[in-house]
């Protein structure tokens, strides 16, 4: 029977990518997508050695261990020696667990599966059997989603509370330069577009704002927006919010073409940022705007 190595190779790439994703989730390791793919391709290439003339050599436990270490090094390096041991241990635990689950599924569906020296190889039509493909195709997107959510949570943890940044807002008609507080408590988003909102103290920038825009900004709590030429000219937004003692607040906002934030550690640029102008003062001279941590995600 003909065995299609390219298809088997693809199947092993997906299976090894699942294993590496689970290891990354368990250890909360940051891994770039291209490093994950390189690690999966490296691990899947093992099947060629098992089916080649050096199969006896690569069936040795020592060679398998060295190959596993290379798999960890390619995907997760740099790391400490202790972290490397933990990653290697988790790799084998996850591999044995998924392998056992796969064998159980084949037994449940009455399918046969051949394992050659620990590599996933099937002769069911030469393309891989439906059970294995179904297992991988269902598991991989679930793991990818969990990894993305875990990475977002990790980024939120990394952002420090009460961080002061130098901020430069570039609007279509004017520019504002100020100090900004990165406050993880600021979760304000536009309910229509779900975009994060930066809050800016409008009264501190009387000289920077055009007169017609400033007059509109200092009286945002009108019952409904009048949508006059000022709203159209500056493309203003109506942003509802809730806070302690105010369950039906409203802010007027507009889109900044570019926001540049910097501190001693980093300089980051964001584009098309939604900025809400607060008429109530922030009661501090240390900063004039409140940054939204979701900008970094």
Image: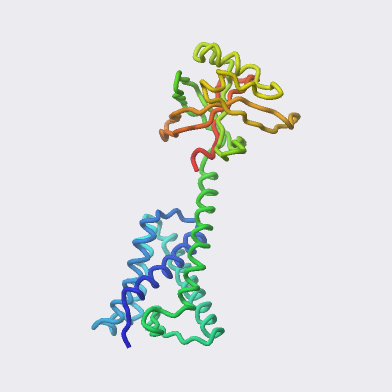
Q: Position of residue 202 (x, y in %)?
A: 58, 19
Looking at the image, residue 59 sits to the left or right of residue 230; the answer is left
Q: Position of residue 98 (x, y in %)?
A: 50, 74
Quarter holding the N terminus? bottom left
Q: Nearer the viewer, residue 283 or 238?
A: 238
- The residue that appears at 23% across and 83% down in the rendered structure is 53
- Among the 4 quarters of the image, the one containing residue 72: bottom left
Looking at the image, residue 83 sits to the left or right of residue 44; the answer is right
- The residue that appears at 45% across and 84% down in the rendered structure is 113
Give the mark count. Answer: 0
Residue sitting at the far left:
53
Q: Nearer the viewer, residue 51 or 63?
A: 51
Q: Position of residue 37 (x, y in %)?
A: 37, 61
User: Vertically, is 42 above or below 2?
Assistant: above
- The residue that appears at 59% across and 15% down in the rendered structure is 203
Tell me, what colour scheme is on the image?
A: rainbow
- Among the 4 quarters of the image, the one containing residue 68: bottom left
User: Vertically, is 21 above or below 207?
Assistant: below
User: Vertically, is 149 above or below 40?
Assistant: above
- The residue that appears at 51% across and 74% down in the rendered structure is 97
Q: Nearer the viewer, residue 152 or 62?
A: 152
Q: Nearer the viewer, residue 74 or 277?
A: 277
Q: Position of residue 196 (x, y in %)?
A: 55, 36
């Amino acid at each position: 029977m003909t065995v299609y190595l390219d298809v088997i190779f693809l199947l092993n790439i997906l299976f090894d990518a699942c294993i590496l994703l689970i290891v990354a989730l368990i250890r909360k390791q940051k891994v770039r997508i291209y490093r994950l793919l390189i690690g999966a391709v490296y691990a899947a290439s093992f099947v060629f050695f098992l089916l080649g003339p050096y199969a006896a050599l690569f069936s040795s436990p020592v060679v398998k261990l060295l190959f596993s270490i290379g798999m960890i090094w390619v995907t997760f390096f740099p790391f400490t020696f202790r972290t490397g041991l933990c990653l290697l241990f988790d790799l084998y635990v996850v591999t044995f667990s998924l392998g056992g689950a796969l064998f159980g599924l084949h037994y449940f569906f009455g399918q046969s599966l051949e394992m050659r020296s620990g590599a996933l190889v099937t002769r069911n039509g030469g393309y891989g059997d439906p059970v294995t493909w179904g297992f991988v195709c269902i598991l991989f997107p679930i793991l990818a989603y969990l990894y993305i959510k875990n990475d977002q949570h990790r980024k939120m943890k990394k952002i420090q509370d009460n961080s002061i940044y130098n901020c430069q807002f570039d609007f279509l008609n004017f520019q504002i330069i100020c100090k900004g507080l990165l406050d993880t408590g600021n979760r304000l988003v536009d309910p229509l577009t779900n975009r994060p909102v930066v809050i800016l103290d409008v009264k501190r920038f009387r000289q920077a704002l055009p007169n017609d825009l400033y007059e509109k900004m200092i009286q945002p709590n009108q019952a409904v927006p009048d949508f006059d030429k000022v709203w159209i000219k500056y493309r203003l937004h109506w942003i509802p919010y809730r806070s302690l003692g105010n369950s039906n607040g409203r802010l007027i906002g507009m889109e900044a073409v570019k926001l540049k934030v910097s501190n001693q550690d980093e300089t980051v640029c964001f584009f098309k940022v939604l900025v809400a102008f607060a008429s109530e003062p922030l009661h501090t001279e240390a900063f004039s705007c409140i940054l939204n941590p979701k900008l970094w995600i």
